[in-house]
Amino acid sequence: MSEQLTGAQALLRALELEGVEIAFGVPGGAVLPLYDPLLDSSIRHVLARHEQGAGHMASGYAHASGRVGVTIATSGPGATNLVTPLADAYADSIPVVAITGQVASTSIGYDAFQEAHTWGITAPCTKHNYLVTDVNDIPNVVREAFHLAATGRPGPVLVDIPKNILAATMTWQGQGTIDLPGYKPRGEGHHKQISAAIKLLLASERPVFYAGGGLVRAEAAEEALTFARAANLPVVTTLMARGVIPDSYEKHLGMPGMHGTYAATMSMQRSDLLVTIGARFDDRVTGKVAAFAPDAKVIHVDIDPAEIGKVRNAEVPIVGHAKAVLKQLIAELEKQLDGDPAPDYQPWIDTVLGWRDDNPLTYDQRPEGPILQQYFIDELSRYMGDNAIVVAGVGQHQMWTSQFWKFERPNTWVNSGGLGTMGYAVPAAVGAQAAMPETTVWAIDGDGCFQMTSQELITAAIEGFPVKIAIMNNGALGMVKQWQSLFYNGRLSGVDLSGGIPDFVMLAEAMGCVGMRVDNPADVPAIIEKAMSVTDRPVVIEVVCDPDEMVFPMVPAGGSNDDVVLNKQGLK
Amino acid sequence: MNHLISVLVENKPGVLARVATMFARRGFNIHSLTVGPTAEEGMSRMTVVAETPEVEQITKQLYKLVHTVKVTEFEPGQAVVRELMLVKVNADPKRRSEVLNAASVFDATAVDIGSSSLTFQVAGTPESLADFLEMMRPYGVSALVKSGRIALAKNSKTKAAAGT
């Protein structure tokens, strides 16, 4: 057991013991002592083209697999390039461990070459971070970092290690231990609160199950569906929760909020009880907080006590792990019903299902074109069934994907919700593909997003990740253009990407992918078929889309959810 | 409104920066903050006076920091609160004894005497420090420094004689 290892070797040993099989990174001076023994490690290294890409790959990997994603970068610019993916993973509670090199501990503070104050810069965008100053600390720090990333409310953890610490020798004493006296994530919820929650639920007349991304992180999909069925609840799934309760669930109302369905948004608005689990009353869900769900009481289940009462007061706060709490809720419901059937919540159920049936998400694809983004996504979703992971960037295409993709399972939807990071899709798709090599990974991207991180398709081509990217090319930063069109008198400023540069097909080919273009609605099924026939390399389809199509329904920013607008004609 | 919060933290490098950054990030205003070792090895105690209507969020956000072990918000009367102040008061030789007399009403100690000024050390409740300052203002206060409040929970429920 007590062999002599360098800090870098100890780090790799510790990572292997955590079950790490793959790491996404870019080397540099400060991590040279790490990249040498990496050659002898069982961990596969995927060389990204930019550290931001490496970070999003780790996040995509974690999203799709539920396991901790690992990314490696060098000191200074390597570490600062990780800031965006870390902030992204922090906002969406994605478990990521980032390893960064640092200048030698003797040089810290002297403005050395490629020195940046990494832990200071990343403290506000990580769950926790470390600067290792003693080589003997490495096993414990790695053990703690993975524990912190994966438990409680998951999130990114960064471990910054100076070059001389990586190169120093230590005596390996075995896997590290965890010593975190102030960190005690809760499991089950308090039984009195569980009882109070079910009492409130059974006394309510217009309940809605407000399901958030925490259910995905807690691997609580099965329990969530069981609870919804047992309690007869209509369900809304937030952007981060799409798939955690299947869209085919008979009382599923869709996604609520700014671009949510009418039924989802309005059911919350008129509800008398929001059964909130793993959701955080994000402004994209609530609209104007003062006008949000004015008659609703709130049951709020969250692993993070700080989310409870942050935006909306909760009549029944429950701190706990969603999976454990749902099991308690299911058992308590059965106990309180005592053999009686669950309330049928009529006429409420009929009302919300009526809203759903009367206000479906629609689009009007004219046969002569141009292609509507919704049509392409709808066709692709139909073709793939639930046999794909779908990834999105940020903007109109993301909202349309959330609206029109039929999600049936958790972890099949990978997107940047909280931070809203444009350029997320390509690298996150690569990470998702690395996690799930047997599953088809589609990224629905925008032409603006694609140009931010497209170079990671080179990584995909060379490393053998045959992702499929569909660029919804509307020649603009579409969501910004939509807002300028609607709220800035149509004065378009800084949003034009039209003009045919770059040639996306040539660009794809240059990066080792198969490039395709489609501009006729009738050709969409065939191009999907053709893309699916390519299995040995990434595919990029440029979908030439309607430049003026807008995302609806829409609640104008700062507006009340009462004022949801169903289409362009509905805007004053 | 000012809230008095006592935070027990692991004494790890950067823990003060983490707390300060969190306050800045969440928009909580720090009125004063002191930090020092506690009886327990490896632990530090911070006493924070924060201006915010939302003390519950502060407490919860503090708990989210991994190195935070215990957070206590003290309502008035629940803790013994003390602060140390050094004050330089104008006092030329002919007024020196008058100033010293006035100061003797308080638990103030003259810790430095210059040709035209006296420096006092005053330890006490924030209120008694304020009273002392009020008393000295007419003579002219040329400099002053405060330690920030420190607080410990009271053992008994009764108010300590020296005030809150």
Image (spheres, coloured by chain):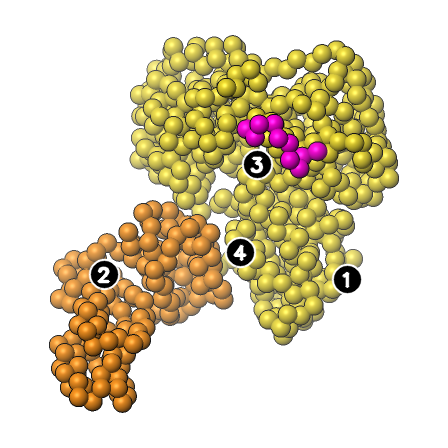
Q: Please state if A396 lies on the left or on the right of A249 as rendered.
A: right
Quadrant where the image shows the C terminus of chain B: bottom left
The chain drawn in yellow is A
Of pointers 4 and 1, the one earlier in the residue sequence: 1
Callout 3 amino acid: Gly
Residue under the image location 66 percent in, 44 percent down? A56
Q: Position of residue A371 (x, y in %)?
A: 73, 19
SS assignment at label 1: helix
Q: Which residue is mark 2?
A: B79
What chain is tagged by disc 1? A
Q: Chain of mark 4?
A: A
Q: Label 1, on which residue? A: A36
Residue hosting label 3: A417
**At label 2, which amino acid type do we have?**
Ala
The residue nearer to you, when weighing A499 against B27, is A499
Q: Quadrant of residue B114?
A: bottom left
Rounded to the nearest angstrom, the CA distance separating label 1 from label 3 is 37 Å
| Residue segment shown in magenta | A487-496
What is the letter of the orange chain? B
- Would you name the residue on which mark 4 appears? A123
Vertical comparison of B40 with A348: above or below:
below
Q: Secondary structure at mark 2?
A: strand
Q: Quadrant of residue A552?
A: top right
Q: Could you confirm whether marks 4 and 2 are on the same chain?
A: no
Q: Chain of mark 3?
A: A
Asked if marks 1 and 2 fall on the same chain, the answer is: no
Q: Position of residue B14 (x, y in %)?
A: 49, 64
Residue at image point 69% right, 57% down: A78
Q: Amino acid at mark 1?
A: Asp
Q: Is residue A306 magenta?
A: no
Residue closest to the eye, A57 or A184: A57
